Image (cartoon, helix red, strand yellow):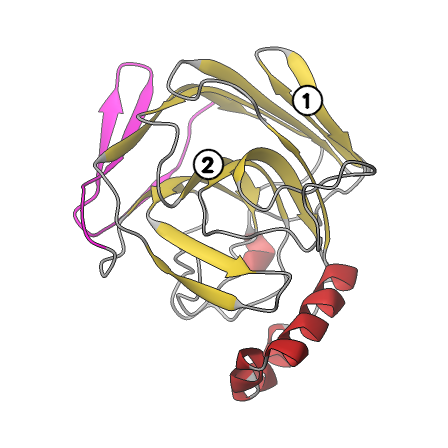
């Protein structure tokens, strides 16, 4: 099918077509500059008009320039929840909402994306705080204007007991499920997502690595990206986000299909 993907670049990043796909590349640099190479299909679309809902099948081949890339990268669907350019390069002018996502994602330390107090627990489901993982996020659909008072209360996040309490509350409201992806990301691998209303299945090179009933609420937008950003909300209540020093890095994708 024909893809209508819009490029987004920051900090000297480049997006180039290859014979079967794209190469998304960010230059080396210091942490004070945000560097992003992204393709998406929601750049000029309100959230309520994003294109994708279940049943949805997605597949591509991908490889990374290095396994310990500082920042984040990935591919899949989300609702671009971090508006006003807050976290992960949200679209300016779009108010924040609670997140919905189904994707493959790499997030280096100091990213901390799990609401579990112990994301490495030996028993029960374990939600990775960082690393390379397949995962989903499902949240209640609350109106954006309900988040405006949160900006006034933002200084409270600096008080760790209050921040820990808010984090636990967020973990009860935002459901998440994930599984680590253990492959050599510098080599070509095939990744696929099958999203149904009642569940999602992730495969790598044809082998199932995660089946979950934590299914996001549509509609969602397609995103493929690489950047030098981090976001962390740790079990100790420390909240932070920003940019990292990074070497030159790239994400290559090919044979992208979805329907």
Confirm whether the magenta stretch covers residue 8.
yes
Q: Quadrant of residue 68?
A: top left
List x then y, in percent, for residue 221. Answer: 53, 45
Confirm whether the magenta stretch covers residue 150.
no
* Sequence-earlier tag: 1 or 2: 2
Q: Residue furthest bottom?
A: 152
SS class, disc 1: strand
SS class, disc 2: strand
Q: Quadrant of residue 32?
A: bottom left
What is the crowding at mark 1: few (fewer than 14 residues within 10 Å), some, or many (at least 20)? some
Up/down of 101 relative to 140, above or below: above
Left/right placement of residue 3 relative to residue 31 reads: right
Q: Which residues are magenta?
A: 1-30
Up/down of 203 relative to 237, above or below: above
What is the crowding at mark 2: few (fewer than 14 residues within 10 Å), some, or many (at least 20)? many
List x then y, in percent, for residue 46. Answer: 51, 60
Instruction: Classify the position of the C terminus by image quarter.
Output: top right
List x then y, in percent, for residue 164. Answer: 67, 71
Q: Residue at x 57, y 84 (%)?
A: 156
Q: CA distance from mark 1 to mark 2?
A: 16 Å
Asked whether residue 71 appears in the rendered view, the answer is: yes
Q: To which residue does mark 1 refer?
A: 209
List x then y, in percent, for residue 2. Answer: 42, 26
Which is in the foreground here, disc 1 or disc 2? 1
Q: To which residue does mark 2 refer?
A: 74
Q: Are marks 1 and 2 in contact (CB under 8 Å)?
A: no
Mark sitting on residue 224? none
């Amino acid at each position: 099918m024909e893809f209508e993907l819009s490029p987004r670049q920051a900090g000297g990043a480049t997006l180039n077509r290859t014979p079967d796909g794209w190469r998304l590349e960010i230059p080396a640099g210091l942490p004070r500059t945000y560097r992003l190479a992204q393709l998406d299909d929601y750049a000029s679309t309100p959230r309520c008009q994003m294109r994708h809902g279940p049943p949805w099948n997605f597949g591509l081949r991908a490889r990374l320039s290095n396994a310990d890339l500082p920042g984040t990268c990935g591919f899949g669907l989300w609702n671009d929840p971090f508006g006003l350019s807050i976290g992960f390069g949200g679209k300016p002018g779009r108010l924040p909402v609670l997140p919905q996502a189904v994707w493959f994602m790499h997030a280096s330390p100091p990213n901390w994306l799990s609401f579990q107090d112990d994301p490495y627990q030996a028993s029960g489901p374990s939600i990775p705080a960082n690393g390379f993982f397949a995962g989903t996020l499902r949240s209640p659909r609350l109106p954006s204007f309900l988040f405006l008072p949160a900006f006034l209360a933002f200084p409270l996040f600096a008080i760790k007991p209050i921040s820990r309490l808010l984090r636990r509350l967020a973990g009860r409201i935002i459901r998440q499920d994930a599984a680590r992806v253990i492959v050599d990301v510098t080599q070509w691998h095939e990744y696929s997502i099958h999203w149904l209303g009642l569940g999602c299945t992730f495969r790598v090179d044809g082998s199932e690595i995660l089946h979950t009933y934590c299914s996001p609420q549509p509609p969602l937008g397609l995103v493929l990206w690489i950047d030098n950003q981090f976001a962390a909300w740790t079990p100790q209540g420390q909240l932070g986000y920003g940019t990292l020093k990074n070497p030159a890095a790239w994400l290559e994708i090919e044979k992208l299909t979805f329907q």
